[in-house]
Amino acid sequence: MSGGTGPTPPTGTGPAIGVARSETGGRGPEPAAAGPVATAPDGAPHVPVLLREVVAYLAPRPGGRYVDGTVGAGGHAAAVLAAAGGEAELLGIDRDPAALALAARRLAPFGARVRLVHGNFRGLEQHLEDAGWDAVDGILLDLGVSSMQLDDPSRGFSYQEEGPLDMRMDPSQPVTAADLVNTAGRDQLARWIAEYGEERWAGRIADFIVAARRRRPITTTTQLVEIIKAAIPARARRRGGHPARRTFQALRIAVNGELDGLEEFLQQAARRLRPGGRMVVIAFHSLEDRAVKRAFRALAAPDGGAAPFRLLTRRPVTPGEEEAQANPRSRSAKLRAIERRQ
């Protein structure tokens, strides 16, 4: 079920591709296809979440400049450029070199209209300066881990598959999930698991992790899963999905600093939007969504006159039942959008 009904949004130049590295608002236009479909390591096609809604709320137009701060395999970016037509340009940013390689393939038909950058969305203003862009017409951020990362056991994100306990979105960063699990203090582990994973049994899981690592280092996903299962009482394990889900989410957020700088990014993005420009953010857990909700409401609050921004979504847009059934991982997605008035 979608999260309500809101106003229907209207539908509406860069160097060559290369790695320098819901309340629904109605159904948007069907994005045009462009380029080969990106595929995950297992060969399955990558399906962007809330694709029609992203295009509808961004309302891309010919000649516009757009930023995808988490470009991934390029599915959203391709749809935005195809819907914009004309000479619209896009700057795509991602921390994951493997994702950027897929995005380069997916976005190749757009040629010099696309620039891909290996980096973090937190550096938005620097990335814009490097591209020679002062202001933009739309900014998209799709937070969280991608299906491609989850489905590749060697990346260590999945609690369903055996793999190294890694969880780095950017493999060049030094700290892995194994490093945190084996060196962080008991109280720090409990705080991460409770806050980032919203796990009821956080303290008990932290105790079991500390006890287990005294016997031998915890280096694989399956080792950690068994420790978590042992920590959670049998009755609780039978409810609420996989018992390791929340702890793995918490460690992933801690490893990648996913919440660090999000609010600052939203402020940077707001400063760089042109009048009429729009920002769309998709969050997958409550901490991210609350941060986006707070920031958007503050931007849309009157400040001695007319509010400089307008909320396009008073409640989050969520996937419809058809999308949720086709892509179960989309169920937790929440989209919020805002428009600059002046």
Image (tube, rainbow, N blue to C red):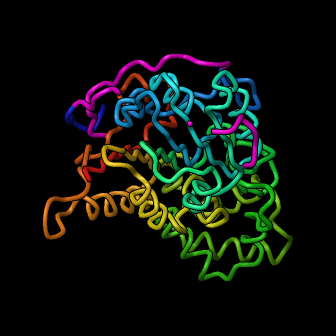
Q: Is residue 48 above or below residue 203?
A: above
The foreground one among 264 and 221 is 264
- Determine the residue positioned at 50% across, 70% down: 194
Q: Is residue 23 magenta?
A: yes
Q: Residue at x 39, y 55 (%)?
A: 289
Regarding residue 307, the answer to whether it shows in the image is yes
x, y percent for residue 179: 78, 70
- In the rendered image, residue 239, in percent from the top left (x then y), is placed at 46, 49
Seen from the viewer's position, the closer of residues 311 and 202 is: 311
Q: Is residue 248 visible?
A: no
Indicate whether 22 appears above or below 127: above
Residue 153: quadrant of the picture:
top right
Left or right of residue 71: residue 183: right
216 and 271: which one is in front? 271
Give the side of residue 31 with respect to residue 5, left or right. Answer: right
The residue at the point 31 percent across, 24 percent down is: 27
Q: Is residue 145 left or right of residue 5?
A: right
Q: Position of residue 151 (x, y in %)?
A: 70, 37
User: From the viewer's perspective, is 233 left or right of 150?
Assistant: left
Q: Which residues are magenta?
A: 8-36
